């Protein structure tokens, strides 16, 4: 199985901050990497797929990069609605996907 | 508009059975692989099972293999998860999710989830 790790596990930030979250795969997964945002009591929401492609309707303040084993999600200017937990997901082994443990972004 | 609506969750005793359903609309259901993903209270996301659209090939996580059965009825645009021999560790919010492409991809749409609680 492909294991996914994320760092940090949590971070505190202020509105307007630039935030970067890292995701690492235990083996190369090319660009088969997605990012999701989840708010309390809500279903996950797709943000990024294919490592850097923005899901339709997602604001351009979100961006993704990386290939192989190392990936990043960046939020260019954090807004109040962005405080949430973020998960990465590999789908190299489709349909057997695996998720990272999540990164919680909260208010400093 | 794609919609996925889960139902069937509830409180069940250890060793019991439950069947979850996911009603899909807004896309050609029979063409897409579908999946169940669960989230234990306060925990992360865990892929549970998937079923292909074309030939209903099934896939399971090791944690549920032999106890859970995924199926679909393309005439009713509905996905199912039959859960037998339930354990306390199966307690979770169960989401159904659609893969982005017909035979590849990640999840582009999720339902709102149905809660399964396994407790005596």
Image (spheres, rainbow, N blue to C red):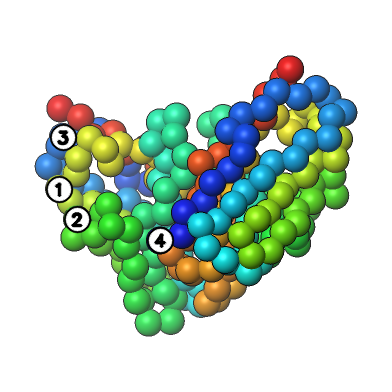
Farthest residue, direction left: B15
Residues at circles 1 and 2 in contact by the CB criterion of under 8 Å: yes
Label disc, if present, on residue B13 of the rendered structure: 3
Name the residue beneath numbered marker 2. B67
Residues under labels 1 and 4: Cα distance?
A: 25 Å
Depth check, front residue: A41 or A61: A61
What secondary structure is found at the residue carrying circle 1? loop
Q: Which of marks 3 and 2 is nearer the N terminus?
A: 3
Query: Which quadrant does the N terminus of chain B fall into?
Result: bottom right
Q: Is residue B35 left or right of residue A53?
A: left
Most extreme residue toward the bottom, as rendered? B55
Q: Is residue A41 above or below residue A6?
A: above
Marks 1/2: CA–CA distance = 6 Å
Asked if marks 3 and 2 fall on the same chain, the answer is yes
Binning the other alpha carbons within 10 Å of mark 2 as few (below 14), some (14 to 19) or many (20 upward) gives some
Q: Which chain carries label 2?
A: B
Residue A39 appears at what percent x and percent y?
61, 33
Have a look at marks 3 and 4 and say if they share a chain: no
Task: Check disc 4 and report the residue beneath it.
Answer: A1
* Residue at mark 4 to residue at mark 2: CA–CA distance: 20 Å
Are callouts 4 and 2 both on one chain? no
Whether label 4 touches label 2, CB < 8 Å: no
Disc 3 versus disc 4: distance between alpha carbons? 31 Å
Residue A15 x %, y %: 83, 25
Distance from disc 3 to disc 1, alpha carbons, whole Å, reads 10 Å
Q: Callout 4: 10 Å neighbours few (<14), some, many (20+)?
A: few
Question: What label does residue B85 carry, if any?
Answer: 1
Q: Do labels 1 and 4 share a chain?
A: no
Please tell me how crowded label 1 is: few (under 14), some (14-19), or many (20+) other residues with Cα within 10 Å.
some
Q: Which of B18 and B44 is in front in this view?
A: B44
Q: Is residue B6 left or right of residue B110?
A: left
């Amino acid at each position: 199985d492909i294991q996914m790790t994320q760092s940090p596990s949590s971070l505190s930030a202020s509105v307007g901050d630039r935030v970067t979250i890292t995701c690492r795969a235990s083996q190369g997964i090319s660009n088969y990497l997605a990012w999701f945002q989840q708010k309390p009591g809500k279903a996950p929401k797709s943000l990024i797929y294919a490592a850097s492609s923005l899901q339709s309707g997602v604001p351009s303040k979100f961006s993704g990069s990386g290939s192989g084993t190392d990936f990043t999600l960046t939020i260019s200017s954090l807004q109040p609605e962005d405080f949430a937990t973020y998960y990465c997901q590999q789908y190299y082994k489709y349909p057997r996907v695996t998720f990272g443990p999540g990164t919680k972004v909260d208010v400093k | 508009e794609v919609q996925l609506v889960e139902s069937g969750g509830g409180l069940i005793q250890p060793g019991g059975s439950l069947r979850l359903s996911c009603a899909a609309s807004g896309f050609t259901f029979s063409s897409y692989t579908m999946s169940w993903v669960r989230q234990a209270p306060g925990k992360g996301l865990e892929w549970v099972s998937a079923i292909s659209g074309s030939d209903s090939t099934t896939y399971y996580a090791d944690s549920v293999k032999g106890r859970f059965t995924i199926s679909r009825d393309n005439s009713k645009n509905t996905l199912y998860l039959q859960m037998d021999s339930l354990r306390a560790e199966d307690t979770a919010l169960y989401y159904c999710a659609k893969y982005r492409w017909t035979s590849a991809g990640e999840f582009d749409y999720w339902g709102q989830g149905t809660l399964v609680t396994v407790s005596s």
